[in-house]
Image (cartoon, grey):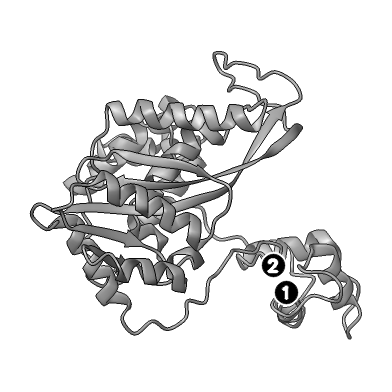
Amino acid sequence: MELDEVVRERLIRVAASVKAQVREVLRARIVLAAAEGLSNGAIALELAVTVNTVRKWRGRFALQGPGGLKDAGRSGRPKIYGPDVRVAIVAVATSAPPHPEATWSHRTIAARVAGTVFAAISASQVGRILADLDLKPHRVRGWLTRRDTPDFWDRVADVCDLYRNPPQGAVVLSIDEKTAIAARSRRHSRRPARPGEPAREEFEYRRHGTASLVAALDVRTGEVLTEVIARNDAATFTAFLDQLDAAIAPGQNIHVVLDNGSSHTAKHTKKWLAAHPRWTVHWTPPHASWLNQIELYFSAMTRRVLRHGDFSSRDDLIDKLETYVIGRNETAKPYRWTYDGTPLKAA
């Protein structure tokens, strides 16, 4: 038996592998030994198998090559349920569930199929058939039917160009609100992490009200100014803009990125912007909040302070939020925006 170099190296890797199945290793060693000129009897003695085993795999390799070392397909037990039952299960699983249920379960699918011309079928059998088809009617993934925005990519390109090439001497801000932040305290103390065991957090909690804030991110420096607000409306928003306008040198132009929230698009806000011509607004497209850099800041705040936070009161929540903002501003750095706003192409 002669082996080319590629096949020999592949068999050597299998024979030396500690992760390959035992039978794969054995078959590779049989072929390698045969290629060295050993007889069937010598190979059987060396590998502690029968001569018939050596003869079988040596012969299959000689006829089929490396593919002959794989197990042959087995017929198995005949299928109890034919294609018509499988089609019926798929038809049910991809249809609307019965009133008042919102999703299908294996049990309800089995009951619906059993009510047709077919014999009864178990929920577990329905599960096996659906798993074989990679069909999971019990799982629902959120989906947004984005409304048609003709200038979507024009807006995207405008915002990205502002981030990547900010106007000389201008202040570039990213502003938005984070509302209804819950102040919750755990009913029992958190258990710290241990080797091999993550920290444990009590799932029961007490509510102590909510807080909302408005924040402005300086895109050039990464510094953020926040203010706790009682209401999220146009009057509150323009009052925050008044503070920013007073804090920024009169000679500087201001470019601001805003989403389409009601407090931003209200007549009162538009009137304020019209009265302050040094403010230029760059509107993100609808349902494209990821273009507003302040959302990156809110995401970091959520992970670091809010998600696993324990707040004894609303004031405690506000204090921790303000402490986080002050501490982060001490080491603030701008976000490195790499997306250029061109339409994404499918791979």
Residue 15, numbered circle: none
Q: Where is residue 158 in the image (x, y as percent from the top left)?
A: 22, 69
Residue at point 23%, 59% (across, down): 255
The one nearer the camera, 135 or 247, is 247
The one nearer the camera, 4 or 41, is 4
Determine the secondary structure under disc 2: loop
Is residue 279 in sight in this rendering?
A: yes
Amino acid carrying mark 2 in the image: Pro
Determine the secondary structure under disc 1: helix
Q: Position of residue 160 (x, y in %)?
A: 22, 62
In the displayed structure image, the side of residue 145 where residue 79 appears, left or right: right
The one nearer the camera, 201 or 77, is 201
Is residue 2 in sight in this rendering?
A: no
Q: In this view, does 29 lie above or below 247?
A: above
Image quarter of the C terminus? bottom left
Residue at point 41%, 67% (across, down): 269
The one nearer the camera, 177 or 152, is 177
Residue 137, numbered circle: 2
Crowd rating for badge 2 (residues with CA inside 10 Å; few <14, some 14–19, many 20+): some
Q: Is residue 175 above or below residue 247?
A: below
Crowd rating for badge 1 (residues with CA inside 10 Å; few <14, some 14–19, many 20+): many
Contact, mark 2 vs mark 1 (Cβ under 8 Å): yes
Residue picked out by circle 1: 93
In the displayed structure image, the side of residue 203 where residue 66 appears, left or right: left
Residue at point 43%, 33% (across, down): 19
